[in-house]
Amino acid sequence: MAREKGINNPQSSPECLKCHTTTTSSARMAGFRSDEGIGCEGCHGAGSDYMAEAVMRDKPAAMAAGLKTVTRETCMRCHEQAHGKSFDFDEAVKKIAHPTKPGTMAHDPRYKTPLRLALRPKSNELYVTCEASDTVIVVNTATREKVAEIPVGGNPTGIGFTPDGRRAFVTNRLDDTVSVIDTTARKVLAAIKVGNEPHGVLTDPAGKLLYVLNTSSNDISVIDVATLKWVKNLSAGNGPWSLAMSPDGGHILITNMKSRFAPLRQPFVSEVTAIETNRGTVEDRLVVPDANLMMGVAWHPSGKFALATLNRTKGTIPMTRLLQGWTITNGLGVIWRDGTVDEVLLDESDMGFADATDVVCTPDGRYALVTSSGTDRIAVVDVAKLLSLVRRSSKYEREHVLPNHLGLPSEFIVNYIPTGKSPRGIAATPDNRYAFVANALDDTIGVIALATMKPVGTIDLGGPKTITKQRWGEQLFHNAFVTFHRQYSCNSCHPDGHVDGMTYDIEADGIGIMPVDNRTLRGILDTAPFKWEGTNPSLSRQCGARLAVFFTRLAPFTPEQLAAVDYYVTTIPRPPNWYRPLGATLTPAQRRGRQFFERTMTNDGRLIAINNRCITCHFPPYYTDRKRHDVGTKMPFDRTGNLDVPHLNNIYDSSPYLHNGMAATLEQIWTVYNPEDKHGVTNDMTKDQLNDLIEYLKTL
């Protein structure tokens, strides 16, 4: 159309701009360029003078402040025979009439997503935390019916009781609180502020102290049960997840989801934190070599040992070992009272036990039941056979063979029990008759008869029966059917849609070349391209073709399934920022840090090149320019240093850092790995200035 009128550049042509911009007529005729198109101001006039008025509530006041009335003549100035097209003003007005009442909003079905469950002492009630509905559901174990649903905080996860069963405590991961429930009245009495993303919760034997595991702040809040006041914090490992009380009440064992930081290409270890309840202090930090994603934990009734679920992710071994079943393995840790730990696998040579999530010992001590969230089943472990295998093995075998042997589980796993979708928490009744398992992704509780080790019923928690595209994608994301021999699922590397803290050697670039740190999926919508080298322009390629070649060794998804998984991944939210709640002002240190983040001059007055300023590559709202840059972090076994700029939202919660996870902390990015000032100019900063910069980065 422009060429027909002899116009070379319609974006700067007054003839075009008089109708195709939001600016005022005088600005249009002056040649003001706008790429925004037509908007409200094009017809109603400039809004700066009346924008503070509630136009639809007080129209006369808005008109007095400058709001222009739209008439036929207003529209016809641009629409009358525009480009040869006819225009019916009366019909157009009907289409653009402003509504005076909000329309009816469509809501997606709200699922329950049961995660953890616990039997209320001295009752026949089972309490179930439901992450998606922000509620706790109460189930009558005798009638196997849902009898109540109690609203709590956001994303409830863990559940615990006082010894008398009169109070229940529920951790709310989204709100960083613990809800206190009166179990008789079935209502919330109070909410206790704790650490970041609380998960497990438990009282001591006397019911005086409450222990709350804060997964993202790596600590344990100790609360006085009588006053509901904070007493102290204890230091945990990396990502404390679940906890269990010894039968004599003297000790609490705590699993930690992430391993401790290890230097690049070095072995890593996980920690089991041990608390002495008499003093309420950490008495030991048990080391579990080569383990990560330690989640469920349960004491054996004898009190001689406890069992904990774990993964053994071979981060330093190329993914080519997938065909040997040796990339991500799933197992149990036997934690002895003297602090030593033995590890065995739950995988077999032709079938993995993906995402071992929780474990419970039967009250008679004969069996342990372990849930596999990725394969929708429970493994029944004969405890005596397991201990016999461990005890007859030599020291060398216990350290090097048992933890990696895929042929040994058949000696002690005596049965597999099918479950619903994605079984997570599990609990056994004190009378040794039944076990209950939370099937997270079909909103049910499975009932298992312990005498026969068979499923005998299902309790419907009342979730919607419609499966949305997002829910389908969530089910696929948590299922290991996509991988060779069902070894792991998407969730295995991205628990809670986040990170496992591991570095992987993916052989796309050659064996041993370019190890890469795992990146979070929280809030990644609109942050393409993906992977550290920016080679995947879309999630469809990331989760489709690339996944098939390098991770699953078979075509993982149909086109419809891939679309559902991709959609689900884009809906994984970021939790509220721990260091800057919504609407909070910056602290003085954070304000100073922002000045350094946006600075253009060094301390000694030198101009910082535009491309080497923090704000150039990391600008809001995602703090990434979605491009590749070389910031001087290339290592000897890297094929390139030209890397995708990661987004910085909630960066405090995604250690380790840099493309291969070599920086344990944010500080190390600049104190150790920026010697030539290629990753921003920081070497002129004082320690206090760098501290301020870090404090600001944590708020993004």
Image (tube, rainbow, N blue to C red):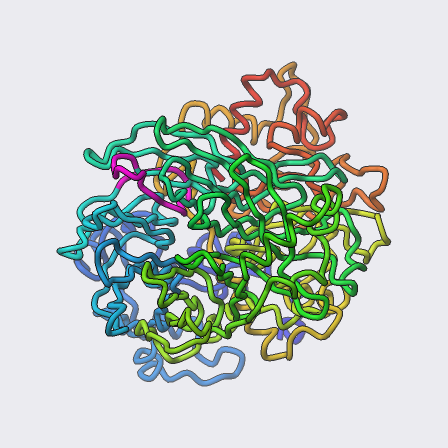
Kindly indicate the quadrant of the structure image that contains residue 205. top left
Would residue 184 be counted in the magenta stretch? no
Q: Position of residue 547 (x, y in %)?
A: 70, 65
Q: Residue at x 59, y 60 (%)?
A: 11
Instruction: Tell me, yes or no, if residue 10 can be seen here.
Output: no
In the image shown, does 666 or 228 lie closer to the viewer? Answer: 228
Q: Is residue 676 above or below residue 106?
A: above
Q: Is residue 662 above or below residue 599?
A: below
Would residue 207 be counted in the magenta stretch? yes
Kindly indicate the quadrant of the structure image that contains residue 669. top right
Q: Position of residue 231 (x, y in %)?
A: 30, 28
Span shown in magenta? 192-209
In the image shown, does 70 or 119 lie closer to the viewer? Answer: 119
Q: Position of residue 255 (x, y in %)?
A: 50, 44
In the image shown, does 680 or 434 lie closer to the viewer? Answer: 434
Q: Residue at x 22, y 50 (%)?
A: 165
Instruction: Tell me, yes or no, if residue 652 can be seen here.
Output: yes
Q: Residue at x 33, y 53 (%)?
A: 154
Q: Is residue 378 left or right of residue 121?
A: right
Q: Is residue 267 left or right of residue 181?
A: right
Q: Is residue 599 above or below residue 631?
A: above
Q: Position of residue 84 (x, y in %)?
A: 52, 83
Q: Residue at x 48, y 59 (%)?
A: 366
In the image shown, does 700 or 75 lie closer to the viewer? Answer: 700
In which quadrant is the N terminus drawn?
Answer: bottom right
| Residue, far left | 185
Total marks drawn?
Answer: 0
Q: Is residue 341 above or below residue 530?
A: above
